[in-house]
Amino acid sequence: MLLGQWLGFLALVLSLYIIWQIRQVLLIVFAAIVLATSLNRLARKIQHRFRLSRGIGTLAAIGIFVTVLGGFFVLIVPPFITQFQELTTTKLPAIVQSSTQWRTSIQAYIPAPLFAYLPDVQDLDRQIQPLLKSVAGQSLTLFSSSLAVVLNLLFMTILTIMLLVQPQAYRQAFVSLFPSFYRRRIDGILTECEVSLGKWVGGALLSMVVVALLSLIGLLALGIPLALAQAILAGLFNFIPNVGPTLSVVLPMAIALMDEPWKAVAIFMIYFAIQQFEGNFLTPYIMSQQVSLLPAITLISQVFFTTFFGFLGLILALPLTVVVKVWINAVLIEDILDRWTQAPDRDRKSGDREVAVDLDLQPLTETEIVMTESERDEASGQSPDRH
């Protein structure tokens, strides 16, 4: 390899290393782009619907987003803190006490050899104490992690507003990074990405609304407190594939334990049925209609992005898959593989001439010599028998 090729290879390796080191920042930037794209589509709809200017439409979209976000925190956060404190300070000791009474009462119905295998609450309490101390000792680490999450959210919010104010300027800056002959094509790919992300956001919102409504109906039927807040939380957790539905059932089951234990089992069965309906029928149908993502591709993308990018990669797995799908389909398949044809006819003819020349240079066998003389005699009108 020449010196220039070595330098280019080293520059490529260094670029990949830098990208890997800042991968979390790039994911936050991508999240800001997704959010800005969604708000930009909302701003354009408001602008065309009410015939407003671009600035007023943008402010209206931001106001709607802030209102929805603030309403979520008002509905979810205070009740969650109250219920969690009540669960840990009042109900959990009561549950432990009732389990002790249950163990004593059931002793009369179990044979003595089997009674030793029943769980001992006191032993369980002794095992939990070191865990609680460990959690208390790591409170500073938890606080620092929470502070990092808040700072990342603040950075994403500011970046989203910047991108939303002047989306075309940032788009032109990105397009200018490509060669001039390919810039129009890149602009078309970005438009396709915007449309696909908008469809995905619409499908995800529809799925979240359906899950929230079904959860609300089930919780109201059981008489669970704070049914609306928990239903909204279930819908929002549905945004996180596979992991979110599991997290959404924890709080309502804990609250049900404070009322009647059988309700916790009923909530688990209701949430399990809802998630089976959502995962096997609702989401595949919506996504196939919106962005045409195959279920296997969706699962593989979640595992891949979670492995390399952690929890944030899991949250952004589907929009990342949508964007990657558009770029692979446009650049790799349409621009490269679909145009990759066989050699032109003139190249094949020149190759045939070269083969013919090679055959002409080879010496003739005895049979070929006799056949050639016979053909020459027939061409001259003579018969080989005359000689």
Image (cartoon, rainbow, N blue to C red):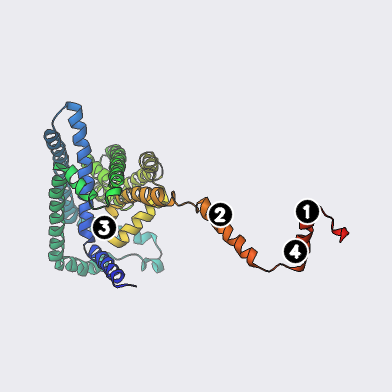
Whether residues under marks 3 and 4 lie with C-beta atoms below 8 angstroms apart, the answer is no
In space, the residues marked 1 and 3 are separated at their CA atoms by: 89 Å
Tell me if label 1 and label 2 are in contact, CB under 8 Å.
no
Q: Closer to the observer: label 4 or label 1?
A: 1
Q: Position of residue 171 (x, y in %)?
A: 21, 46
Of residues 235 and 180, the one nearer the viewer is 180
Dot 4 or dot 2, earlier in sequence: 2
Circle 3: residue type: Phe
Tell me the SS state at disc 1: loop
Circle 4 or circle 2, nearest the eye: 4
Q: Which residue is disc 4 drawn over?
A: 368
Q: CA distance from mark 1 to mark 2?
A: 32 Å
Which amino acid type is marked by label 4?
Answer: Glu
**Marks 1,3: beta carbons within 8 A:** no
> What residue do we see at 19% from left, 42% from top?
168
Q: N-terminal of the two: label 4 or label 1? A: 4
Label at residue 349: 2
Residue at numbered disc 3: 311
Q: Earlier in the sequence, mark 3 or mark 4?
A: 3
Q: Which residue is mark 1?
A: 380
Disc 1 versus disc 2: nearer the observer: 1
Q: Quadrant of the C terminus?
A: bottom right
Q: Residues within 10 Å of mark 4 (few under 14, many from 20)?
A: few
